Image: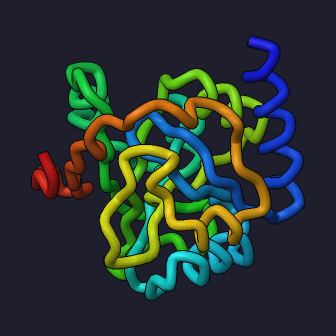
């Protein structure tokens, strides 16, 4: 537990200064930053060699943070989150209070509510959403373990979280797009 708390402090210090981190999530290793900081978001796009037109998702730790970013959350979103047995990313319309360069061209944003202890506690400390994108160069396979992460990515971040580096990741999350007019579309199972 002491390591967990120290890693949260270390990661938070880097994030609040506009840095980017490499960290374990509830699915695969992710690259993250403060989702309200456009300069930090731009650093991630540059590191991943990814076009800013390809949006990234954000992690949140509950209802309060969700309502800070989305004024309208379809009721079905809460039902999906309650019933999901595995990590689920929801793409919702009309985000606000986040960096503009993280919002997709159709004015939507992917969000996943996390329960994983490191991410959850880091979000508690940040009081802001955390960017989460797979720890790979755009177009390359998503690494399923820390040892598989491209050294360019490891060197390119400001901090590498020293937790779960021996764990093999599960599958990436299910992705479901929910529009404000109640359309539901499964993007990835």
Report x, y in % for residue 106: 32, 77
The N terminus: image quadrant: top right
Name the residue: 64% across, 31% down.
163
Judging from the image, the colouring scheme is: rainbow
Q: In this image, 40 relative to 63: left or right?
A: right
Q: Nearer the viewer, residue 152 or 123?
A: 152
Report x, y in % for residue 169: 37, 37
Name the residue: 23% across, 57% down.
179
Q: Nearer the viewer, residue 48 or 73?
A: 48
Report which quarter residue 51 is drawn in: bottom left
Name the residue: 63% across, 28% down.
118
In the picture shown, does residue 155 fall above or below 182? below
In the picture shown, does residue 98 fall above or below 14? below
Q: In this image, 30 relative to 183: left or right?
A: right
Report x, y in % for residue 101: 56, 78
Report which quarter residue 148 is drawn in: bottom left
Report which quarter residue 37 is drawn in: bottom right
In the picture shown, does residue 68 fall above or below 39? above
The number of discs equals: 0
Residue farthest toward the top in the current orientation of the protein: 1
Name the residue: 56% across, 62% down.
96
The C terminus: image quadrant: top left
Q: In this image, 120 relative to 11: left or right?
A: left
Report x, y in % for residue 89: 32, 45
């Amino acid at each position: 537990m002491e390591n967990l708390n120290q890693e949260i402090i270390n990661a938070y210090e880097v994030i609040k200064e506009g840095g980017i981190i490499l960290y374990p999530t509830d699915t695969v290793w992710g690259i993250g930053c403060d989702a309200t900081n456009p300069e930090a978001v731009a650093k991630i796009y540059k590191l991943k060699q990814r076009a800013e037109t390809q949006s990234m998702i954000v992690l949140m730790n509950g209802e309060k943070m969700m309502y800070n970013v989305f004024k309208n959350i379809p009721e079905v979103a809460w039902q999906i989150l309650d019933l999901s047995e595995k990590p689920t990313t929801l793409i919702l319309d009309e985000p606000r209070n986040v960096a503009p360069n993280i919002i997709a061209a159709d004015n939507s944003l992917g969000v996943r509510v996390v329960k994983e202890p490191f991410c959850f506690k880091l979000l508690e400390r940040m009081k802001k959403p955390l960017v989460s994108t797979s720890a790979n160069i755009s177009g390359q396979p998503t690494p399923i373990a820390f040892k598989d992460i491209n050294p360019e990515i490891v060197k390119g971040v400001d901090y590498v979280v020293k937790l779960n580096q021996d764990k093999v990741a599960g599958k990436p999350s299910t992705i479901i797009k929910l529009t404000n007019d109640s359309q539901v579309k499964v993007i990835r199972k």
